[in-house]
Image: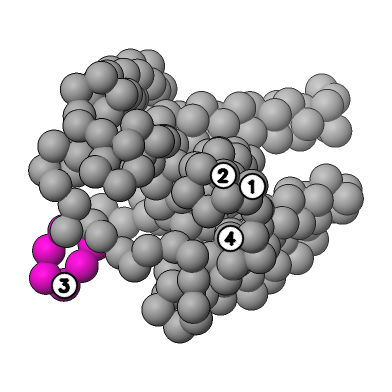
């Protein structure tokens, strides 16, 4: 099965509808468990004390900010190159979700940075590149909002998304390429995680919960977008039955 098997909106709807609610419920359970173990059942850091607990919200949000933009750029490339009917729907649905994860990462990073660095914000390479990522999300959404012709909007937004992807590896490797206030990677390392298991477990629980939440929100947003486009087509051609099913 390939991504093109989901090109038919009716088929996508049949597959997405039954898993939407269970996916949202699973996300709530995972995030709830992650927050409980992170906030109440994990030890304070020997240097940062209780402040380290911000990590359980901040770090997975930062991971998801990059993952969402990667998904956004990939969907945009598929739509731009292969004209996949649902690719631009997926990309457009991903943008606001990724923007929220990025905003959460920036805000919680600021809250974490104040006691650790003595300032709410520093023009550090990692912070600056994540802020640029947030503006890329906003720029992508602005293109969709500004252009009425949705086919043209999809093409231009895809170009913005694909070009902006260069920022993702910059964010990832900024702590290695430049002097940074951020510490190097402590989880995804060739020699294994350096973080203690009592902290790693709730961190990964939160990351998994955020990932499942993204899937739930993406499915819901895509279904809403498909319904809105179907309604627009019906309103644009009164009296004419419109089917979104592609003839095989």
* First in sequence: mark 4 vs mark 2: 2
Which mark is first along the chain, 1 or 3? Answer: 1
- x, y (%) of residue 143? 80, 55
Tags 1 and 2 touching, CB below 8 Å: yes
Q: CA distance from mark 1 to mark 4?
A: 11 Å
Give the crowd class for mark 4: few <14, some 14-19, many >=20 residues within 10 Å: many
Q: Earlier in the sequence, mark 2 or mark 3?
A: 2
Note whether 91 is above or below 156 in the view shown. above
Q: Which residue is mark 3?
A: 190
Principal secondary structure, stretch drawn in magenta: loop
Q: Are marks 4 and 2 in contact (CB under 8 Å)?
A: no
Q: Do the CB atoms of the residues marked 2 and 3 lie less than 8 Å apart?
A: no
For the magenta stretch, what is the residue range? 188-193
Q: Quadrant of residue 193?
A: bottom left
- Residue 92 shown left or right of residue 77 in the figure: right
Residue at point 23%, 57% (across, down): 187
Which-is-in-front pick, marks 1 and 4? 1
Is residue 12 in sight in this rendering? no
For the point 19% across and 52% down, the residue is 195
The image quarter in which residue 58 lies: top left
CA distance separating discs 2 and 3: 31 Å
Q: Is residue 244 magenta?
A: no
* Residue on which disc 4 sits: 127
Q: First in sequence: mark 3 or mark 4?
A: 4
Where residue 154 sits in the image (x, y, percent)? 71, 57
**Residue 168 position within the rendered picture, expressed as x and y whole percent measured from the top left:** 50, 68
């Amino acid at each position: 099965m390939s991504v093109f098997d989901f090109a038919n909106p009716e088929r996508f709807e049949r597959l997405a509808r039954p898993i939407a609610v269970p996916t949202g419920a699973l996300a709530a359970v995972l995030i709830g468990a992650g927050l409980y173990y992170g906030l109440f059942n994990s030890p304070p850091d020997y240097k940062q004390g209780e402040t380290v607990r911000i990590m359980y919200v901040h770090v997975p949000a930062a991971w998801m900010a990059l993952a969402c933009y990667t998904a956004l750029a990939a969907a945009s490339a598929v739509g731009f190159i292969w004209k996949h009917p649902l690719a631009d729907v997926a990309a457009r649905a991903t943008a606001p979700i990724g923007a929220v994860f990025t905003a959460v990462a920036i805000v919680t990073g600021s809250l974490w940075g104040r006691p650790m660095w003595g300032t709410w914000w520093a023009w550090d390479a990692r912070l600056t590149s994540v802020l640029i990522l947030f503006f890329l999300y906003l720029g992508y959404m602005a293109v969709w909002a500004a252009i009425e012709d949705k086919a043209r909007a999809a093409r231009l937004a895809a170009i913005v998304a694909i070009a902006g992807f260069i920022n993702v590896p910059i964010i990832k490797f900024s702590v290695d390429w430049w002097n940074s206030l951020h510490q190097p990677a402590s989880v995804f390392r060739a020699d294994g995680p350096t973080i203690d298991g009592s902290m790693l477990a709730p961190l990964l629980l939160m990351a998994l919960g955020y990932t499942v939440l993204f899937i739930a929100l993406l499915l819901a947003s895509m279904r809403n977008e498909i319904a809105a486009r179907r309604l627009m087509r019906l309103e644009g051609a009164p009296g004419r039955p419109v089917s979104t099913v592609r003839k095989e």
